[in-house]
Image (cartoon, rainbow, N blue to C red):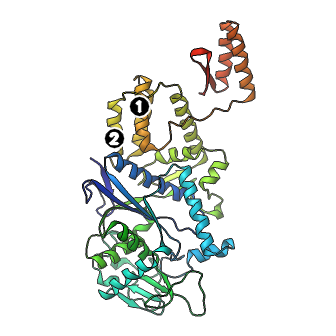
Amino acid sequence: MLQIYNTLSRSVEEFKPINPLHVSIYSCGPTVYDYQHIGHMRRYVGDDILVRVIRANGFDVKHVMNITDVGHLTSDSDTGEDKMEKGAKKFGMSVWDIAKKFEKQFFDSSDLLNIKRPNVVIHATDAIQDQVDLIQILEEKGFTYKTSDGIYFDTSKFPRYFELSHQNPDELKAGARVDMIEGKKNITDFALWKFSSKGEKRQMEWDSPWGIGFPGWHIECSAMSMKNLGPTFDIHTGGIDHITIHHTNEIAQSQAASNKQFVKYWVHHNFLQVNGQKMSKSLGNFYTVEDIQKKGFDPLALRYLYLQTHYRQEMNFTFKSLDGAQNALKHLRSIISEWDEPKIGCAEFEGRFVNAVNDDVNMPEALAIAWELVKSDYPSKAKAESLYKMDKILGLQLNRHEEIKVPEDVQKLIDEREGLRKQKRFHLSDQIRHKIRKSGYDVIDEKGEKTKIVRI
């Protein structure tokens, strides 16, 4: 049975979906104001693997993801500039064009990493009325109040506010968690709707029952997830940085509105560092998937590297580790290229692989089992059958054999060896083959005098 770590209970639980056959998942999507880097993309690979694992367990999955193209402020205290407006100024473009540019960059990166698209992708700007409707429900139930700045959720009226974060409210201080702004009743209260500043014409603003403005960041996820998946759904994913504020606020406003449990299982992914430091442009260690590709790396080598660290553990990225991952992936593909066509399979290894991925999506263990299979004495056709099944979760496209580009000096040796073989001077051709192998390549002689070239 599939076991998943649930942040809500702080424990690994047996996964029991609301509907025995269908699983509902909501993923916090990107804020499309700037480039998505390899730390962001590690999380989305993690979501992709989780969905693949659930489907491999026989469930039908409805996966919904939002695109945040308005309302995400630069500060968690509901102050600061809207990130979309900030991005527009930075790149000298309209907020609408910025949103299109970086949404495309996100999905281009996703495609390079072989991330399957969610069933539903919805933009915050396409769901303004849904967010207004939800705020009105909260207003009618007495959970909101108005300030000069906007409409706020009163967290003191939701007793279970700290259920997800497990924080001690007595230890919170203004300035430590969020800044205290004029008119807020409690330091944990958060904006549902922000008013446009007087004298300011925003590029993204809408009329509402409370005045012209724009929705807060948190309300969009509640409105869009519940519209597409219902008031209670199975899994909500995100980064660990979402636990204490964004996801805590989602629970409060959603359950206050519906009076039902919002989400059964909360799945959070840990951070990625670069050479032991937080990724930032100022440190010169900010990389996108496209940057990795330009440096000569296969994006799927990055996916392979992600698989080597459990999603709940912090990962440290280095180019040395990425180079090692790329070499391992090339070696794996080279081995597979010599195998017979898939047939039958290896039940022993398939069973162990399933046990690993069902143990809180333990991909490092699953990857190790895949390599054990590759090195086993089973017939290659059986290994191929099982490995390709495993790859439906690994997502490394192992049945896509890459074209081998042979250096000119090695190709001359290959041609020389072919000439010696045609002359039946096999002793000398074997000596040339030894030179080829020393260069990191090998030749496999197949039927009909056909020669296959592989990396070693």
Percent position of residue 145, x then y: 38, 90
Report helix, strand or loop for mark 1.
helix
Side (left or right) of 321 relative to 141: right
Precedes in sequence: disc 2 or disc 1: 2
The residue indicated by pointer 1 is 385
Residue 308 can be seen in this image: no
> Which quadrant of the view contains residue 301?
top right
Say which amino acid is labelled 1.
Answer: Glu
Side (left or right) of 5 relative to 432: left
Percent position of residue 407, x then y: 72, 30
The residue indicated by pointer 2 is 354
Q: Is residue 423 above or below residue 261?
A: above
Say which amino acid is labelled 2.
Answer: Val
Which quadrant: the C terminus? top right
Q: Residues within 10 Å of mark 2 (few under 14, many from 20)?
A: many
Side (left or right) of 77 relative to 295: left
